[in-house]
Image (spheres, coloured by chain):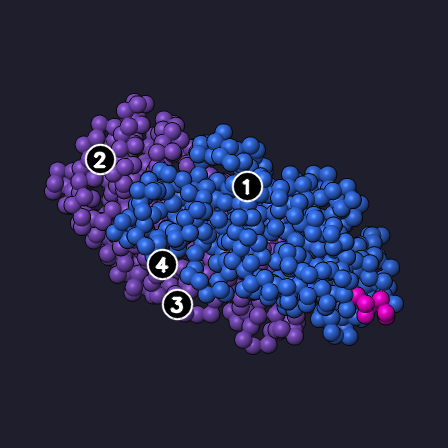
Chain colours: A purple, B blue
Amino acid sequence: MRIEELKTPAFLIDLPKLKANVQMMKARAQKNNVNLRPHVKTHKTAEIAKMQTAPEAPGITVSTLAEARFYQKSGFKDISYAFPITANKLSEAAELSASLNVFNILLDQPQTLSAVEEYGREHGIKFKVFLKVDCGYHRAGVDPSKPASVQLARQLAASDYIDFRGILTHAGHSYHCSNPAEIVEVARQERDVMAQFAEQLQNGGIACDTVSVGSTPTAMHAPDWQGVTEIRPGNYVFFDKFQADIGSCRPEQVAATVLTTVAAHYPAHNQMLIDAGALALSKDLGADHLGDEIVFGAVLNHPRLRLFSICQEHGLITSNDPIAFEKHPVGSLLQIIPNHSCLTAALFPKYHVVEEDQVVDEWTPMRGW
Amino acid sequence: MRIEELKTPAFLIDLPKLKANVQMMKARAQKNNVNLRPHVKTHKTAEIAKMQTAPEAPGITVSTLAEARFYQKSGFKDISYAFPITANKLSEAAELSASLNVFNILLDQPQTLSAVEEYGREHGIKFKVFLKVDCGYHRAGVDPSKPASVQLARQLAASDYIDFRGILTHAGHSYHCSNPAEIVEVARQERDVMAQFAEQLQNGGIACDTVSVGSTPTAMHAPDWQGVTEIRPGNYVFFDKFQADIGSCRPEQVAATVLTTVAAHYPAHNQMLIDAGALALSKDLGADHLGDEIVFGAVLNHPRLRLFSICQEHGLITSNDPIAFEKHPVGSLLQIIPNHSCLTAALFPKYHVVEEDQVVDEWTPMRGW
């Protein structure tokens, strides 16, 4: 089937670009001697996760327990669930622990440690647990400069009901950067905070096998990973306008677009209507800290067109110049580069895999919680 | 099952509130002598659409052709597809026309009229078509003050391949209002523009059976619908923070919330982490034109808590006061009132229907295009 025969809106994955992105990150991890445990929340498919992993590096990272169940059923055996566990999720986590070779959970609260220990004691289970560390993003994790954080690590390591796996962070503040030089600084901070905290723990007699860091921007620009053992980037399989805007990737590396139909011309308002709206793109504002005019995606090959407004199924394109409507006839197709491919991909029940103008495959992601 | 036994995040529908909203709009339509053709894109379930319709008013409005197919299979026989049709969607539209008693499409482009006529001529089909009118929102539709718009209506009415059904608009600019008085003004404009255009067409010998208007805010506040024959509100089944903020509804009418677990406390940043992020809420900013601080939803029963930041699965709550963490233990539940219930509902593979603290039903919405 050719791309132009698809129903719109459709989520397109450029297979050669996807493969190049996957290989690029494998090569970066190998060269820097760190384990790559990709975050699969970006795509939630078995197909891409298989491409991202290898017999010597079989581990993946997930954002929900439903993802963990999906990947367990898809044959994956080594999974980290990278959201702080809570008591109401422990029975699900226990089932996953029983059915996988490795199922890592994480926590950063003393109350949660108590809940995990209590569950473990009652059910005869030893959970594999990471301590979540805040390396400067301030979204989640313990402050490594605080004695209470060392104390929590010590309790984890000493618990009879816990197999303490190490420390884990996500440098999400790399998304606040404006250019590669700034990303390098965040990557250094992520590395240094984690390496120093791991050293502090080890000097205090707390074994800390794994030192895990994340984020696609820092994974792209880290000068090295001295003291780090594992990286967990996710977005790099597709990249998106956000990553290109902050210099995390080059625009031509973006592997995901949304195919859409031009539905109407409104010359009086210098506008065109497309059939990709908030349900096909998400309302993510992208790198809005850069101060550019807000758009809800970029129009591939037409950088002067601005997707300035989206409703549920409607998208409106304008331009600072008069739109050359004759180049975009009613019924013709456009491709939108999403602001944030993780959120955009999550809106589609299936993905169309393309090479040049041909649809070569169709992949079904998992959904829900 | 009780609400607290649900996995989080979960989409909860308060059944008594839903029923009250459904009855309220039916009563408004009946009292004002207009046909209610609800827009079902807000929920995309058969269950709620059945509640919204009646033997004497069986029609619904959909936003995608996939919705139309889903509702056709669910036994609905009278459907309007309220997005401008394009040539690449005509074969799907033809199949729907053949399998339904009524399948209305709409257009506002002369090129699309030509495409519809050509398809009709080739396949021996007579499509039922509305002319989409811009009543002031400037998203889509013809300008009723322009002679070309009357000319397009005349061509529709005269075509051998088209059954011209009338005119249709959506006063989406009601969402830019700040209070009920402003909404009343938009409702008057919507009514007057459409009634006058219909009269103009009829005076010109163009029969215009249906005069259809939309939007929940205008449906809630229109003083009357003189000259209008049909209303197509959708959001009113659930309402949301946006509708409450602009005065379209009262806050206690909102029937949809997202159940979430408090996953962590960060007193140093006066923050709490919840497991409802952008994939559970959408990144809709709500009524951001009102100038209030941006939040991604309201915390039910805790108006001082502010959900100020969301990532894919993470939500961060703060407050202008010190958070009373002891009232929200780690592992406890909160309910988030979504900014925009249509976009939030669309993220969930199933809805949990609740009465007080009991889950009484589970509904499965349709997804995709």
Marks 1 and 2: CB-CB under 8 Å?
Answer: no
- Residue at position x 55%, y 69% from top? A305
List the residue tagged with mark 4: A175
Instruction: Give the magenta-colored segment's residue range.
Output: B197-204
Q: Which mark is residue A290?
A: 3
SS class, disc 3 = helix
- Residue type (three-letter) at the residue carrying disc 4: Tyr
Whether residue B80 appears in this view of the structure is no
Numbered disc 2: what chain?
A: A
Front label number (4 vs 2): 2
Q: Which mark is residue A156?
A: 2
Position of residue A164 relative to residue B22, above or below, is above
Front label number (1 vs 2): 1
Q: Is residue A240 left or right of residue A353?
A: left
- Residue type (three-letter) at the residue carrying disc 3: Leu
Q: Quick check: do tags 4 and 3 share a chain?
A: yes
